[in-house]
Amino acid sequence: MNPAGEQKSMRLSVVVPVHNGGEGLRLCLQALAASARPPDEVIVVDDGSTDGSAALASALAAHVLTTSAGPRGPAHARNRGAEVATGEVLVFIDADVAVHADTLARMEALLAGEPDVAAVFGCYDDHPPARNPASLYKNLLHHYVHQHGAREAGTFWSGCGAVRRAVFWATRGFDETWTSMEDVELGARLRQAGHRIRLCPEIQATHLKRWTLASLWRTDIFGRAVPWTRLILRQGRLSSDLNLDWRSRLSALAAWALLACALLVLAFGLLGLGRLAIWPGLGVLLASAGVAVLNADLYRFFFRRGGARFALIAAALHVAYLFYSSLVFVCLLVSHRLRGSVGRSREPTIK
């Protein structure tokens, strides 16, 4: 695949939803303008911004739409942009993402070279500008997971992804009832309709967002774990894509074993049964080793990109992620099963 220097073979419409994009929006649009393969049109959908994002986008030569009674959410904004797009390919870029010079060229080359592929997406790069531990961890984890994901994907990512416009509308676009993970939900429908989606790790962009510990946990739990579990329950099967692969599942079990053993050590200590604590203490060591072995490559990656101190912090954040994401899944699964049981028990008996 030759990502640059080729004659355009298709028309690319870039859609950027924004709500108070600030400096990130400026960098996003400037990066698009500097692309080796420039977009044929850039449509910025201002979703109720109060910081002048619409004026900024207009000054940077984007076609600006404004949602009514915003903010209405990214799914609504992307659909409004897609409605006026004239390109045969819709490229979705988040307002806090700066594409690389070859990002659009690589998307075009893949879609032109593989006509049976309906959509393609890439990943964040491994040098985000925000270097605090939460931001570095979050962005590097995303990069690592996408770099090691299956190339034939069962999901989609709208942070930096492209889909053929005809296929997009044939599957009814983004479901606007989803306030987050709407791109994953769209990917599931694309696959159910028999379309191919490609994960291309060479397609990369820089994530400009600065994360805090609070925003990281809030997004992981309410913006990802909850809606992703909802999608899994709707489909009736557990996907093996990205961070739901077998290694992640075993890591979650090892993390819970670590927590259980640690609580037993604490309980024995409080009860004055220190001699018995040796056995759960051994369990702590074994479970910790299990998590470390299962994620050794990831933790080495953290070390290479941020040093020893960051690697320890990132490993701790990752173990915490294994706890709360799996806890959300189990809680919602149990709730779903209980509601189903109650519903069946209320069905009238036919005699």
Image: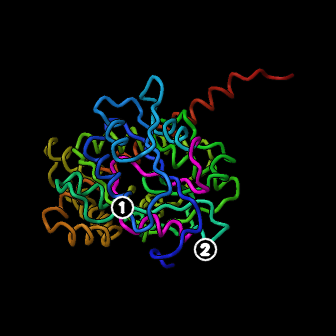
Q: Quadrant of the C terminus?
A: top right
Residue 229 placement, left or right of 99: right
At mark 1, the secondary structure is strand
Q: Note whether residue 56 is visible.
A: yes
Q: How busy is the neighbourhood of tag 2: few (under 14 within 10 Å), some, or many (20 plus)?
A: few
**Picture residue at 36% right of the left edge, 36% below the top:** 54
Residue 343 placement, left or right of 336: right
Kind of residue at disc 2: Gly
**Picture residue at 65% right of the left edge, 42% below the top:** 172
At mark 2, the secondary structure is helix
Task: Tell me where the magenta segment starts and ends, as one range.
Answer: 83-110
Where, by quadrant of the figure, is residue 70 drawn?
Answer: top left
**Picture residue at 29% right of the left edge, 48% below the top:** 26
Q: Which residue is mark 1?
A: 205
Q: Residue farthest to the bottom?
A: 2
Q: Note whether residue 254 is visible.
A: no
**Picture residue at 39% right of the left edge, 56% below the top:** 253
- With respect to residue 309, does 60 lie above or below? above
Depth check, front residue: 160 or 150: 160
Q: Which residue is mark 2?
A: 113
Depth check, front residue: 86 or 228: 86
Q: How busy is the neighbourhood of tag 1: few (under 14 within 10 Å), some, or many (20 plus)?
A: many
